[in-house]
Image (cartoon, grey):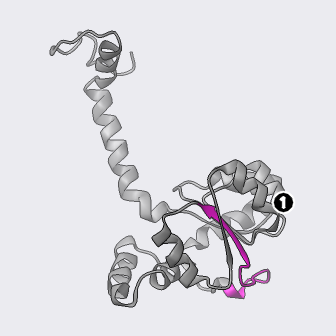
Amino acid sequence: MVHRRIQHVVASFAALLPLLLLLAVPAGAQEDAAALIEQLGLRLAPEPVTKRSDWRKPQRIVLPRFSAEQLAALEVVAPEAELIAVNSAREALEHAADADVIIGFCSRALATRARQVRWIQLGTAGAEHCVAALAAAQRTPLVTNMQRVLGPQIAEHALAMMFSLTRGLHRYGDLQRDHRWRRAVPNDARHVGD
């Protein structure tokens, strides 16, 4: 039951990102944000996050140490929240107990310790590890990820890896490590899976 609810929450990612994109950009750039939302195919969820029974305005947000400009943009969007910038997952774990929102971190230990977390924003496309950790800890915060944002890069990476394998580039790495420099394709470079 908890796992199914978390899956439903993950699916509602589109409810929050368009709003954040529009709020986090300067007024003159809102047209660009709207175009980005359209380009990524993001849609509003049928019900706003503020209608969730456990919703409340975030007081403490744990996040990776961003640039000064990024932190300033977040302070504009959430002026009443305390932003806790951390340098590592270990440091995020230290602040998890009182966090309402955690950005960029999720683990079994964090899910267990984050007793009042309402939202976890992942910086990755996948959310499976986080969903499993939250289910084990019997927590059901809103979980959002970067699936739509990172989709093109993931597709490009998959194609690059496929080309790498079909051309035997891993064999050149072996030669380079052994300090053997030659232009010819190693005899077995065209056999994928060797």
Hey, which quadrant is residue 47 in on the image?
Answer: bottom right
Q: Is residue 1 visible?
A: no
- Residue drawn at the location 56% of the way across and 63% of the way down: 145
Q: Position of residue 29 (x, y in %)?
A: 34, 84
In the rendered image, the quadrant that contains the N terminus is bottom right
Hey, which quadrant is residue 172 in on the image?
Answer: top left
Above or below, 26 against 12 in this view is below
In the shown orientation, is residue 21 left or right of residue 88?
A: left
Q: Position of residue 151 (x, y in %)?
A: 41, 58
Above or below, 137 against 72 in this view is above
In the shown orientation, is residue 117 left or right of residue 84?
A: right
Q: Position of residue 5 (x, y in %)?
A: 74, 67
Above or below, 19 against 65 in this view is below
Q: Nearer the viewer, residue 191 or 18?
A: 18
Q: Residue furthest left?
A: 183
Which residues are drawn in magenta?
A: 50-64
| Residue type at tag 1 | Gln
Q: Residue furthest front?
A: 68
Q: Is residue 158 visible?
A: yes
Helix, strand or loop at disc 1?
loop
- Residue drawn at the location 36% of the way across and 45% of the way down: 157
Q: Could you tell me how many numbered marks the image carries?
A: 1
Above or below, 53 against 137 in this view is below
Q: Position of residue 50 (x, y in %)?
A: 68, 87
Find out whether residue 69 is within the magenta segment. Answer: no
In the shown orientation, is residue 148 left or right of residue 190?
A: right
Hey, which quadrant is residue 59 in on the image?
Answer: bottom right
Residue pointed to by mark 1: 138
